Amino acid sequence: MSTQPRMEEARLMETLASLDKEKQKEVLVDLAAEGNAAAATELLRKLSQENFREQLAYRNLIISTNKVAFWEGLLEFVVAGTWRGQPLEVVPSVSGCPRTLKPLLQSLFLAKRDGGADSARDEALLNSLRSSNPDIRRVAAGTLGERKSRRAIDELARHLTDPHPRVRLHAARALKRIADPTAVEPLIRCLSHEDEILSGEAADALGAIGPAAVPPLLQVLQSRDGWLRWLATRALSHIGDERAIDSLITALKDEDGGVRWLAAEALIKSGPKAVEPLLRALLREKMTPWFQEGSHHVIGSISQKVNGRRAAILRPLLLSLEEIDAGVEAPVAAARALDELRSLGLLAA
């Protein structure tokens, strides 16, 4: 340790010696927030001590602090091992954040407290998203997602175009955790990003957001780009919204096998509600090998999940979809199944 840090530590110890234990804790937090590296070091040492009761007292004090600068410093230490740019040695001979201490420090950001402490944590994390250090931006984005901070949505959306790929990825995952409809528009734009891992995360985030994402996803499903259609189908399959059924039936004829498969799986998840629209499509749509295969997969899978009477009515249709001349046989079988299901009141509402 160089001379200046030793002097700072000596002055700190002199200051603390004149105070009672409770006041010492408060002063350490205050000085650390002001950028005092010696105070930050001492405070972090207290957190890493074996005396659980004393450690808990410091933990509770930190969780309750509403000093934004303190939380900024703590995140910087977790990521970079520095406090306001100054390296800390919390454990002798170990520079930076000790591996055993990091989970505890990260958990402090996830604690919930009424009043200004929660707001201060969010503010510090939002400020850290503007750091020049991409690792700090990455961890800040991920932590905001774990906190499900709706205050962060606009800022996280901006970081979907961050120059660093890992920051972009953590921003998309954070938006998935928060799952707020206000993030739909930037996530839809993100589907077109050249980074396919990122666009996949954006699709998953849209799937997590749910019904609010359906209308723009249905538009993406009309794209000429097979990858975009696949992403839209993937998101829609997670959502399971009835508004997508007709478009998913159309996607059973898509030239992309991945799109067809996801569309079929999404329709199967819809269960009996997909039966009537699919039967009507079999009446009017031209039969192609892909549409035949997809319809057979969907009808067969749903038949296994419905009651015996419905399954028995759908059985002839299923067999017709296995024939070489399915284009002739399937529409007839679909019409019969539709009439019988309707007459028995077995069509899903």
Image (cartoon, rainbow, N blue to C red):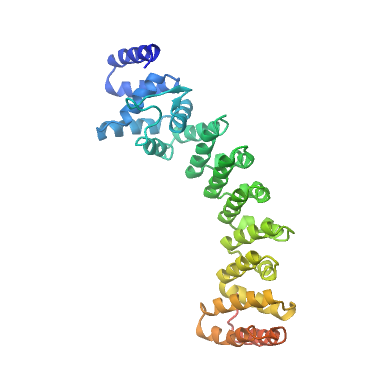
- How many marks on residues? 0
Is residue 348 in sight in this rendering?
Answer: no
Q: Residue at x 50, y 31 (%)?
A: 124
Q: Quadrant of residue 98?
A: top left
Q: Is residue 49 above or below residue 210?
A: above
Residue 162 on image: x %, y %: 62, 38
The image quadrant where one finds the C terminus is bottom right
Give the image location of residue 187, x and y in percent: 63, 49
Q: Residue at x 37, y 36 (%)?
A: 99
Image coords of residue 41 (percent x, y): 37, 23
Residue 29 image-quadrant placement: top left
Q: Taking 10 as reference, is 301 above or below it?
A: below
Q: Decide if residue 346 is in sight here.
A: yes
Residue 285 x %, y % = 74, 77
User: Is residue 259 found left or right of 97 in the rendered image?
Assistant: right
The residue under the point 60% across, 48% down is: 198
Residue at the outermost front position: 93
User: Is 35 placed above or below 261 here?
Assistant: above
Q: Nearer the viewer, residue 63 or 204?
A: 204
Identify the image quadrant of the N terminus.
top left
- Tell which of 270 and 289 is nearer to you: 289
